[in-house]
Amino acid sequence: MAAQGTQSQTPGDEPEQPGSGAGQTGRAVALARLLHRECSHLLQLFKEKESFFENYTPDGGRIVSLSTDSEEPSTEEQVLRLHSALRQCLGLIHCVILKEEEEWGELEGDYESMRKNVHQRLQYLLHTTKALMETEETILEVTPDHQCTEEVDGSSGLFALKMWTFRVLVELVHWADHAANTLYKLHSETEEKDPN
Amino acid sequence: MFMSFSCWAKDVIPVPQQVSLSPNSNTQQISVSWYGGEATTFDLLILRTEFNVTVFYETLTVVADEASGRHEFNWTSAEPLECTSLSVKVRSRRNDRPTSESMLVYPQDKIVPAGSNITFCCIIGEGKSFGSFHFISETLNVTRLSRRAYAATVYNPKASPTYGYNAYCRGLAQSEISGAVLFVGYPPLLTDFICETQDLISAVCHWTEARNTHLFAKRLKTRYSINGRNCLCNPLGEYSLTDTADVRTRVVPLPPEELNTVASARNTTVRWQWRHSQYSCSLLFVKWSSHPAMKNKGELTRLRTFSGVGLRSVVLLDLYPYEEYSVKVRCGAQQNFWRWGNWSKTISFRTDCDTPSTPDVWMWMNSDGTGEILWKPFEPRKSNGPIVSYEVTLWSPDDNTRHTQIVPPDTFTMPVNLSGITVNNNSKVIASVVAKNPAGLSPPASINLPLHVTNLETITKVDFREGAFPLSWESDANSSCGYVVEWHEASCLRDCPVEWIQVGEENTNVSVKSDAFEPGVRYYFSLYSCSSEAPKLLKRWQGYTRELTPSSTIQLSTKQQDSDILITWSEIPTSHQRGFLLGYNVYLNNGSQLIPLASLSSQENREDTGGTASITLEPYADWLILEILATLGVTSLALIVVTFICYKKRKWVKGAFYPDIPEPKLPSDWSTPQSTLDVKPLPHSMVHIVEKPEWDSSKDVLVVIPEEDENDEGQGIRDEPVDTDESTSLRYYNQVVDERPIRPVTQTLPIPLRHHWIPDAQM
């Protein structure tokens, strides 16, 4: 039996049909995947400049967490929760930039450049999920959701800042991957409803 | 009593004061009291003094008495107090900072100069185990300081990168990690500290950082100050340099502003303003240069210094008329010159036109009184402005008539015709050429036109050497204004395009060069004297830059006179000669080779006029004709004799060569009818029918009418049995003439054709 043509295509690669639901979700999936790649690259750049983190796995669970319901949420609800988590992630990367610039100034290396990329890409993804999910009843914000007042693991010093930054970057990789998977689920369901 | 204290870095723990001991021999107790401030934890050490043996060492929590403010502790000795001397030490203790379970590393964010050693300590969490201590990627050897503290030293670290070095401590669990960042760099070091002023109000100081501090973090960057307002320092130290000078000796003037020019033809006034009204400059450095478009014509850049009190303008002299220049100015202090200030902006200007220079005029006259007035276009910077027109005037002093013609600026010749002028000894016709541009008219360039064209018989050959024709002559006393050397192609006879050069009267030689010279072309060079009279031809030369073979063939015409053949040819045109003719060689062409017959040399300095050669036929040619005639005659005679003899003996000749052919004799009458030719047949042969074709009854066939029955006696053919085992046989019947009729037969039944063959044995 021949595979379904739509299922064999990579979301985001199909011909763009402005206005179509599948087109929008496909673009969202592609954007989330790009963000995941960039977050992974950013983490790699960080490890290269702070060589000891190669063999370190942070402990302590997620920085960003979502409330869990007893029932399995629908895909739309998952995307809404994802949107909330991404807002927190935006707050975290915003805080990282703030603290690092406070210590090192505005450097222009590869790490700083990719950090800026991730920040902008995350903002764009938030706008995309807002466009996908917002309704008259549900208004979605795209502002960072983080106060940036923590004392980075309760201790002071630049090393503690580096440890915390590392944890944030790992968190971003996790949530970008989660975003890609959740949005792909939404994209698949949207395509089933509207194959055209 | 000993008192000791310990402290952590910045925090100082209070030292117990006024420690007193109160022994009670009955209870064998010593009451130790002291002032410990707010501390509640103390280490108490009791020693047997003489042997320095510890009998009590514990950490105690003792709260101060509210009334007295003193802390008190009672110790009971196992031995009576009278046995030996005892010593007591008390010290305050702040509970170990890392009361938490996490690991800590000290010092945090330390900054050290390059080349120094640094010791870190790692304090593991309560109940945890130490793993390892690392500096960047290197594992360090540790020294245990206490139950939970471990120290490691880094020796002579190099200057750190942007984000510093990481020194970190690991526990046994993968996630147990803590560390500190170390910065290694240099204190600031600078050189070339100089301060200047441009307005005697503010100063600008410059310096050079002689060494990178390697401290990149924001809070570690070097800070600067001058005259104590800020510090030239970073966390590793302070550096100071002093520049002391009278500010008036450090003046770097501001550049002039708002430059403008007032230009004339050959000089320009440059003016400017100063930013501050009270500003003045007494030393100016001015640079002006021709526009880059003039580069191929010799771009001119000039520098000049002007000095004076309060200069606000300068005059640039000796400029070229109608030329574009650019100029810029900078100022320096005339007294206590420190250095030149910055350049002003560069401005461009164009000088005005001036009247043109005198044109270079010459003439060409034909023998019939016609000719041309010629002049050269101006060289760069000679026209002094765009030429508007030329005015050519012909006038005769005799009758004071003038004819002026205005020609456009791109015209450099004008035809003249003097043929109608009555000539006497004093007749003169003068041509004047004046160039005109927006500034006015040039001085006139005049030339006396010769009314008769003279020629010279002698033309000297001149060789082309080193790219030029070297010409030399004897000085002529009448050449009051020098000489003119003119040249043109020799092939031109009328209205020739000529080139010329003016030569000063003191010169008697010149090398003539021209880009127009071509190989194979003869040029005539003429030397004229320049005076108040018409130019006089003094000398002529002719030459080639390079001689080539003649370019045209010679047309021969022949004429025979008796035994002589006269060959004539005409001259080769000068343009085809392509070199000086040395002569002619005459050859006889017999079809396979050229046999030289004659060689004719040209007369030197004579024009070629062609040539004539005469060939006389040799006598042996007549004998040849006689021989031929004689041979013909003898042959004819021989034919006549032979013919006569043959006629006389014709009968014998006939009989010998073509006798008559006799007729044949017949023995009997040949008219009897023919009979059967009895021919013995050939030896027996069998014709075996291997196939009997089917008879096609639809077709008519030609068959022989079958013979009668074969019962005739003695004659004919009889059916004889044949010695064959074949089923059928054929007999050959031979008849020379078969007179039996042959007619087509249509039959339904096949009738075999029978051939009778009579074998020899049965005959």
Image (cartoon, coloured by chain):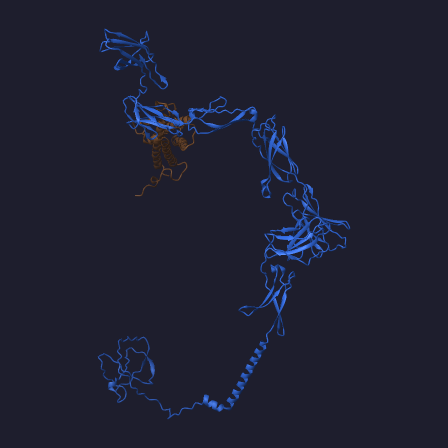
Chain colours: A brown, B blue
Q: Based on the displayed image, in which of its 4 quarters is residue B492 positioned? A: bottom right
Q: Based on the displayed image, in which of its 4 quarters is residue B334 positioned? A: top right
- Location of the N terminus of chain B by quadrant is top left
Residue furthest front as drawn: B50
Q: Nearer the viewer, residue B114 or B574?
A: B114
Above or below A107: residue B450: below
- Location of the C terminus of chain B by quadrant is bottom left
The residue under the point 26% across, 11% down is B86
Left or right: B129, with A195 as reference point? left
Above or below B68: residue B666: below
Q: Nearer the viewer, residue B537 or B427?
A: B537
Does any portion of residue A65 appear in the rendered image? no
Q: Position of residue B640 (x, y in %)?
A: 54, 86
Q: Position of residue B597 (x, y in %)?
A: 58, 69
Does any portion of residue B595 appear in the rendered image? yes
Residue furthest right as drawn: B399
Q: Position of residue B17 (x, y in %)?
A: 33, 11
Q: Position of residue A195 (x, y in %)?
A: 36, 38
Q: Based on the displayed image, in which of its 4 quarters is residue A140 positioned? A: top left
